Amino acid sequence: QFRAEVDRILTQDREDEACLARRIEFARVRLELALDRAGLSSEDLSDRAPSASGVDATGRSIQPAFPEDVVARWNELHALRTELVERNLYLVLINVERYAHTRASRLDLIQEGSSALFRAVDGFDWRRGLLFRTYAVHWLNQAFRSFLYNFGNTVRVPVYLQKAMK
C-alpha cells in the first residue's frame, strides 16, 4: 500500500528540484529574519512546531507563545521540506531493496530512510550542482548501515568493532 502511494507521487526533474531547494533556502532566511525581529533564536524553536496561541496540538499550555509571523514562516518551511521529502520517497523504497537480505524489518528501514531524507534536505546545497537524489542516497545508505549496526545484533556491539570484524 505504501509503495502504491509513493508511486502516485510525481518525481522531480533537475529544474523543479533546484527551484524547490531555492524556495527552502529562502524560507529558512525568512524564518531567521522573523526570529530576529521577535528577539528569538532558532534554538528557541527546539525542534517543535511553534504555536502562536501558546497551546500545543494536545491542548497543553506551552511556553513561550510565538509571534504570528514566526509561526507562519516555520509552517512555510516545514511544508516545503515535507514536499521535497515526499517527492523523493521513491529513493527510500529503491534503496531498501539493497538491504532486503538483512534481518531488519523493511518498515524499520523505511522509517529510518524517511528521517534520513529530512536530514538530507537540511544539508542539501543546490549551488553545488548536485541532484538532490544523489546527495540523499548517501544519507540513506548511512542511515541504513547505522540502523543495521546498532540494532542488528541481540547484543549491541559498537560500530567500530563491527567494522573491524568485517
Image (cartoon, helix red, strand yellow):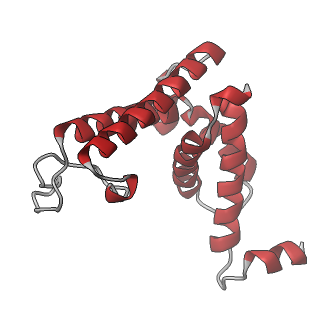
In this rendering, is residue 78 above or below 43? above
The percent coordinates of residue 21 (x first, y second) are 54, 27
The percent coordinates of residue 67 (x first, y second) are 18, 43
The C terminus sits in image quarter = bottom right
Q: Is residue 152 left or right of residue 1?
A: right
Can the viewer see residue 7? no
**For this rendering, which residue is in front, 81 or 72?**
72
Name the image quarter holding residue 1. top left
In this rendering, is residue 79 above or below 15? below
Name the image quarter holding residue 18. top right
The percent coordinates of residue 34 (x first, y second) are 30, 38
Looking at this rendering, what residue extends furthest in the bottom direction?
A: 155
**For this rendering, which residue is in front, 95 or 116?**
116
Q: Is residue 56 left or right of residue 141?
A: left
The residue positioned 19% from the left and 49% from the top of the image is 66
The percent coordinates of residue 54 (x first, y second) are 12, 54
In this rendering, is residue 13 above or below 109? above
**For this rendering, which residue is in front, 104 or 59?**
59
